[in-house]
Amino acid sequence: MTRPLALVAASLLVLGLAGCTPTGPVPTPATESATPDQPNESPSPEPTGPPAVADLQLTTEGLGTLQLGGALPAADDDTSMIVFDPEFCTDERTGTPAGIELGSNAAGLWIPAEQYRTEEGGGYVRAPFGVGIWDDAVQRIEIEDESLTTDGGITLGSTAADIAAAYETVELVPEGLVTLHVVNGTAGKLVFEVATEDESLPGYWEPDMLGTVVLARALAADEELFAAAGSGNVVNSCPA
């Protein structure tokens, strides 16, 4: 017997709807975490102590935290590159009969911080740099050994050609035993003393020293140029 068309159509519709009904569990929509992800890394500790020599370069502005013409550090500043020792030049410490007693004007001296220096007899101190302090400000910073360079890579033993290659503008000032190679900046200037032959003192320099840097310093902008080669004009030392 033939089924009515309406009944066949109704049966097919039921089968079609049954085929569209999901048979598994209905997925739950993802929800955002109520707490944002926290960083895994801990913040870096604040630096303590003066900068390492490897991080220093002498420039026309100064050396590290030592700024030419800048104010002197506070006594309790543990990051300072220099410290004031009120008895550094006393006869008791140096072992010399210079007549310098604790409390006198010549007794104290600004010297590199302890991590930089190796003390020697007679009031001297060995360090990669030396400082000249007057008018309550840093006026002079010198390179004392090859472990310290300028921002152009110049140090003791570099050549005049090295200086010319490192700096675009260099002023030359003849000064007898040396020629000053001067690089001017805003706050100060770099001054390299390059050994030259002096007719009045023939043979003063070893042949391999001629044409090389024998002294190097930075001076505050208003400080006059000078040559220290062959003189007693040194830093980090006590009065004789």
Image (spheres, rainbow, N blue to C red):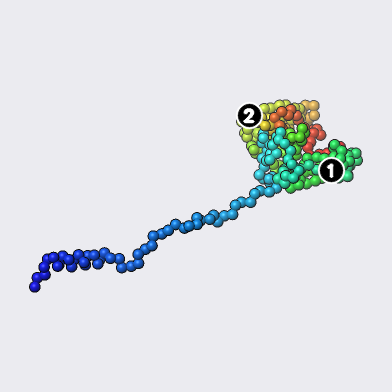
Q: Are marks 1 and 2 in contact (CB under 8 Å)?
A: no
Q: Give the amino acid at mark 1.
A: Glu
Image point 11% across, 68% down: which residue?
4
Residue closest to the far left: 1
Q: Is residue 32 left or right of residue 5?
A: right
Residue 169 position by quadrant: top right
Residue 229 appears anywhere in the view: no
Secondary structure at badge 1 equals: loop
Can you say which quadrant of the picture contains the C terminus?
top right
Image point 68% across, 31% down: which residue?
188
Seen from the viewer's position, the closer of residues 208 and 2 is 2
Image point 48% across, 57% down: which residue?
34
Q: Is residue 7 left or right of residue 223?
A: left
Mark 2 crowd level (few <14, some 14–19, many ≥20, 10 Å Cα): few
Residue 165 appears anywhere in the view: yes
Read off the residue under disc 1. Answer: 87
Residue 231, position as x, y percentages in the image: 80, 32
Residue 16 position by quadrant: bottom left
Seen from the viewer's position, the closer of residues 15 and 118 is 15
Read off the residue under disc 2. Answer: 169
Q: Is residue 240 left or right of residue 73?
A: right
Mark 1 crowd level (few <14, some 14–19, many ≥20, 10 Å Cα): some
